[in-house]
Image: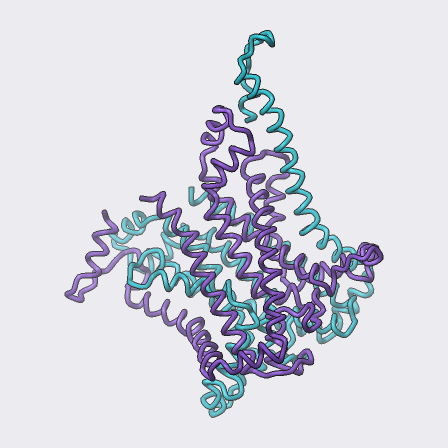
Chain colours: A purple, B cyan
């Protein structure tokens, strides 16, 4: 009720805006500061990339796609990101379920460890994988001997992405699971449903938007990941070169000995950016819609 | 399912158990097995994916011994790298905290057309590749960039220098404070603020005496996440820094160069230092998160 009144007041055509206590600064200074901040720091750079990426037509994109191996880089990125989303979608949901529904000693510790990727720099995460699985380490040497290549191979990219995105899925599913009344599951079980049936018919439908949201978040994060991958992948063109690393080589060819230039980089970036933005909007819709439904 | 077994059941002869009761009992057994299995898989996954690599870097970082660690930290490049990371972190956290609270107030309290779009804009940096963020800065401030002539006329160095490195880090760290503070504000409602305001407190008084204390744990949680991101940023900073050794090299960029130049030992030691700091941050993150959840409920 109160919300509705406020809304009507601010929308009054007289132009006189009521002072509202919620805002520390008045509504207009607050709006001004916030929008200027977001406009300067986010909107302006985004406009620059779209203008440069699409401004010169799609020629640059075609150049990059055909001659420079952009397509292979994008395909590798899409495949590893999709695998990451699927694997962490399943195991992240399992982890969230374990953290919420099962009581065991060390549960708080496990919950903290799941957040580790939020705290650790992604580059350090990549270096961790090299330390563990690199050809110079004991375990890496043993695996290499048995024909399993992790570092400088697609498997390493996958491991790095799984590391970085695990908390995204867990933290997306966990709050929804906490809200879900265990009584529903018990009711299903009392009525004779097995554990798996209960999960499939009762728990999963309630979690579906959160799982999809978390997996999408993991997917879009994987599309753009640089730090965790750059050391692990070895960046072999057409083999282990992902799109973000490819773009970094295009921007500054001297950095890593690539070819091309900023125009091609902008074109590939604009493509990747457009994909990410659509994914953000989609995730936003998925994550926000169920909570709205429960409010009304 | 475990509640079923914990209930004191009547000692009844087996043949008098109904079919459903028998099914329930066997289900409880299977349920316990399934739970144990789920727990085992979850623990194994976390152990293999997250903890084993952490163990790996601790082992290889410390293997070189204290002498090597001391030598690494006496290198001027390493010291400067840490100093630069610290400066970038400080400015980034200050900016994203102050403006983040303003944006959070706007999203939680204000109503205006296009609010969803603003919310999407705030979350955008989470989805954009850091490399693309770096490219954005190059397109704005670099050669033939939008502001190139403006900057050149004033003799300011932005690209390949500290300002651009700070700008890209701010871009990437924007979402964290906003995302953590908005739900707390929404949960909080406006009653207390209205009360303070009715009693004659000014807007700023209301904010500092009522709102800020109420959102402090959520805010600290956001700040901790923001700090972690600012320290760990590498992709965007790599693009705009120009990789000037000992001048625009942050701790993460130092690791990258040391690794490329086969000085893996130094890379491990610097990385281990960052990892140790991030674990301290993680403890803060967990504490703030728990207090925030308690505060919200």
Residue shown at 59% from the left, 45% from the top: A111
Give how far across and how far down residue B260 sits, in percent.
Answer: 74, 73
Residue shown at 37% from the left, 53% from the top: B211
- Of the 4 image quadrants, the one containing the N terminus of chain B is top right
- Of the 4 image quadrants, the one containing the C terminus of chain B is top left
**Residue B97 in view in this figure:** no
Q: Is residue A86 above or below residue A102?
A: below
**Residue A105 in view in this figure:** yes
Give how far across and how far down residue A202 sits, in percent.
Answer: 47, 36
Give how far across and how far down residue B116 sits, in percent.
Answer: 36, 60
Q: How many marks?
A: 0
Give how far across and how far down residue A216 sits, in percent.
Answer: 51, 56
Q: Is residue A74 above or below residue A93?
A: below
**Horizontal arrangement in the rendering, residue A151 relative to residue A290 (left or right):** right
Q: Which quadrant of the structure image shows residue A83?
A: bottom right
Residue shown at 78% from the left, 57% from the top: A148
Residue shown at 41% from the left, 62% from the top: B120
Q: Which quadrant of the structure image shows residue B37?
A: top right
Looking at the image, which residue sits at the far bottom?
B153
Which one is nearer the viewer's eye here, B36 or A16?
B36
**Horizontal arrangement in the rendering, residue A60 relative to residue A149 (left or right):** left
Which one is nearer the viewer's eye here, A152 or B19?
B19
Looking at the image, which residue sits at the far left?
A14
């Amino acid at each position: 009720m109160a919300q509705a009144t406020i809304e009507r007041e601010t929308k009054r055509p007289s132009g006189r805006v009521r002072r509202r206590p919620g805002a520390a600064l008045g509504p207009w200074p607050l709006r001004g500061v916030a929008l200027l901040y977001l406009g300067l720091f986010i909107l302006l750079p985004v406009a620059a990339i779209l203008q440069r990426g699409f401004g010169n037509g799609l020629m640059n994109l075609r150049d990059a796609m055909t001659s420079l191996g952009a397509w292979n880089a994008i395909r590798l990125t899409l495949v590893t990101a999709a695998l990451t989303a699927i694997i962490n979608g399943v195991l992240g949901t399992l982890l969230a379920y374990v953290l919420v529904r099962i009581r065991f000693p060390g549960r708080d510790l496990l919950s903290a460890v799941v957040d580790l990727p939020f705290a650790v720099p992604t580059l350090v995460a990549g270096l961790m994988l090299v330390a563990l699985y690199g050809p110079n380490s004991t375990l890496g040497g043993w695996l290499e001997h048995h024909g399993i290549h992790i570092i400088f191979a697609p498997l390493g990219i996958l491991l790095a992405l799984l590391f970085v995105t695990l908390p995204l899925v867990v933290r997306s599913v966990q709050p929804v699971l906490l809200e879900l009344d265990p009584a529903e599951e018990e009711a299903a079980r009392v009525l004779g449903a097995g554990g798996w049936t209960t999960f499939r018919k009762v728990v999963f439908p309630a979690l579906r938007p959160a799982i999809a949201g978390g997996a999408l978040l993991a997917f879009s994060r994987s599309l753009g990941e640089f730090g965790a991958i750059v050391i692990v992948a070895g960046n072999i063109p057409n083999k282990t070169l992902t799109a973000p690393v490819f773009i970094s080589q295009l921007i500054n060819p001297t950095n890593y000995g690539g070819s091309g230039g900023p125009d091609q980089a902008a074109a590939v970036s604009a493509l990747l950016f457009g994909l990410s933005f659509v994914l953000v909007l989609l995730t936003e819709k998925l994550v926000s819609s169920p909570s709205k439904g429960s409010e009304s | 399912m475990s509640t079923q077994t914990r209930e004191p059941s009547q000692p009844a002869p087996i043949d008098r158990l109904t079919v459903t009761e028998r099914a329930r009992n066997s289900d409880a057994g299977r349920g316990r097995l399934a739970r144990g299995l789920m727990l085992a898989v979850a623990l194994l996954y976390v152990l293999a994916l997250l903890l084993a690599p952490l163990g790996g870097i601790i082992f290889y970082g410390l293997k070189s011994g204290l002498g090597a660690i001391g030598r690494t930290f006496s290198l001027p490049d390493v010291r400067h790298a840490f100093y630069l990371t610290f400066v970038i972190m400080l400015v980034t956290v200050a900016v994203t905290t102050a403006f983040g609270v303003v944006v959070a107030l706007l999203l939680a309290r204000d109503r205006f057309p296009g609010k969803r779009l603003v919310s999407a804009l705030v979350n955008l940096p989470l989805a954009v590749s850091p490399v693309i963020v770096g490219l954005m800065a190059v397109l704005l401030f670099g050669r033939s960039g939008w502001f190139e002539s403006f900057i050149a006329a004033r003799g300011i160095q932005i690209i390949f220098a500290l300002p651009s490195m700070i700008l890209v880090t701010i871009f990437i760290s924007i979402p964290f404070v906003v995302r953590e503070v908005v739900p707390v504000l929404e949960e909080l409602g406006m009653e207390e603020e209205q009360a303070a305001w009715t009693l004659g407190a000014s807007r700023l008084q209301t904010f500092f005496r009522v709102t800020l204390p109420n959102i402090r744990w959520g805010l600290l949680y956001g700040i901790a996440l923001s700090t972690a991101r600012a320290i760990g940023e590498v992709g965007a900073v790599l693009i705009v820094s120009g990789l000037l050794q000992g001048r625009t090299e942050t701790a993460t960029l130092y690791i990258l160069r040391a690794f490329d130049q086969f000085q893996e030992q130094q890379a491990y030691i610097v990385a281990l230092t960052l990892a140790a700091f991030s674990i301290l941050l993680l403890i803060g993150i967990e504490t703030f998160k728990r207090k925030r959840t308690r505060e919200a409920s």
